[in-house]
Image: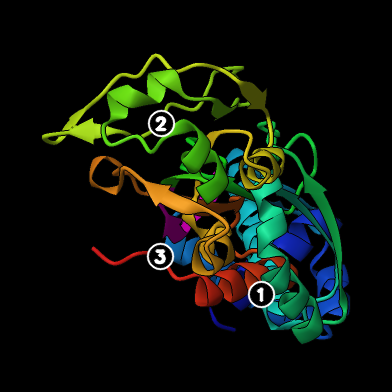
Amino acid sequence: MDQLGALGAFVHAAEARSFTEAGRRLEVSSSAIGKAVARLEERLGVRLFHRSTRAITLTPEGALFLERCHRIFAELEVAERELHQAAAKPQGKLRLSLPQLGMRLMPHLIAFQQTYPAVELEMDFSDRLVNVIEEGFDAVMRIGEVEDSRLMMRRLQGFSHRIVATPGYLEQRGTPKHPSELASHACLHYRYPSSGKLDAWPVSEDDKPVHLDLPQSAVANAIDPLMAMAEAGQGIACLPDFILVDALATGRLISLLEAYVSDRRSFTILWPSSRQPLPKIKAFVDFMVARLPADRG
């Protein structure tokens, strides 16, 4: 028997307190079990069993070694299960937490489910900072990075902000040429639900951040209402560029102060740390990374 086989012979003999019973379980002779244990004892340099004509009992060294062997076989069992899961087809319910901006990612989520129809998506759209482990989410997507040693993380595609307003609003109120002129305009703000803080507009001059004390004409804890108000000509908003593509291309909104706006943020995807994630989680992470590759550099 090889070393692993010898360990198995020892464990079965220790649990059964019998070479004969261990041989029956492993479908080998009792003498084969005895010889395997004897070779193991010789290699280790200790006696693992007290032997008598009626029974065998563990020595103190044998009891300690049995505990170690249980751990070894438990690890092997976990490894086999992980390999089986890795080879399995992605399926079952996938619980996702996404920011409200995640609504803009729906084409990718739809494409994922079309690719993996056996995966059932359960999506929670919220900007609150969920507890991934305690709340039982399989994966979450967030803006920025989250520090949690229990989670794995992959960075996805980045985005920038643009300061925008409608042509009608600018015709009526004037077009700001410098960030300081924003103080006389109606400004639409995003408030973080988790902290209650307003998201500062990423304005800089000569590579130095500029602090702006802006009017709070409207505040919302979601992006879509601010987008709707900006398109209705209610004021100037600072919004992610990827939701503005169509509005800027058609001229419904105009980008302002571009020389002063500079930032780069990214989506991240997080999931519970594991030696080998479940097939449904691995499939989702790989799919989103492929469709939304992180910025280079």
**Amino acid at circle 3:** Ala
Res 283 label:
1
- Looking at the rendering, in which quadrant would you find the N terminus? bottom right
The correct choice, above or below, for 213 with respect to 131 in the image is: above
- Which residue was labeled with disc 2? 201
Write the residue at 64% across / 45% down.
Answer: 227
Write the residue at 64% across / 48% down.
Answer: 231
Question: Residue 199: image x %, image y %?
Answer: 49, 27
Cβ atoms under marks 2 and 3 closer than 8 Å: no
Q: How is the image coloured?
A: rainbow
Query: Sequence-wise, which precedes: disc 3 or disc 1?
Result: 1
Q: Secondary structure at mark 2?
A: loop
What is the CA distance from the residue labelled 3 to the residue labelled 1?
Answer: 17 Å
Is residue 10 visible in the rendered image? The answer is no
Question: What count of labels does the image hold?
Answer: 3
**Amino acid at circle 1:** Ala
Q: Secondary structure at mark 3?
A: loop
- Looking at the rendering, in which quadrant would you find the C terminus? bottom left
Say whether residue 29 is magenta. no
Q: Could you say which quadrant of the image residue 192 lies in?
A: top right
Res 46 label:
none
Q: Which residues are magenta?
A: 151-161
Left/right placement of residue 96 relative to residue 155 reads right
- Which residue was labeled with disc 3? 294
Crowd around label 3: few <14 · some 14–19 · many ≥20 (10 Å): some
Query: Sequence-wise, which precedes: disc 2 or disc 3?
Result: 2
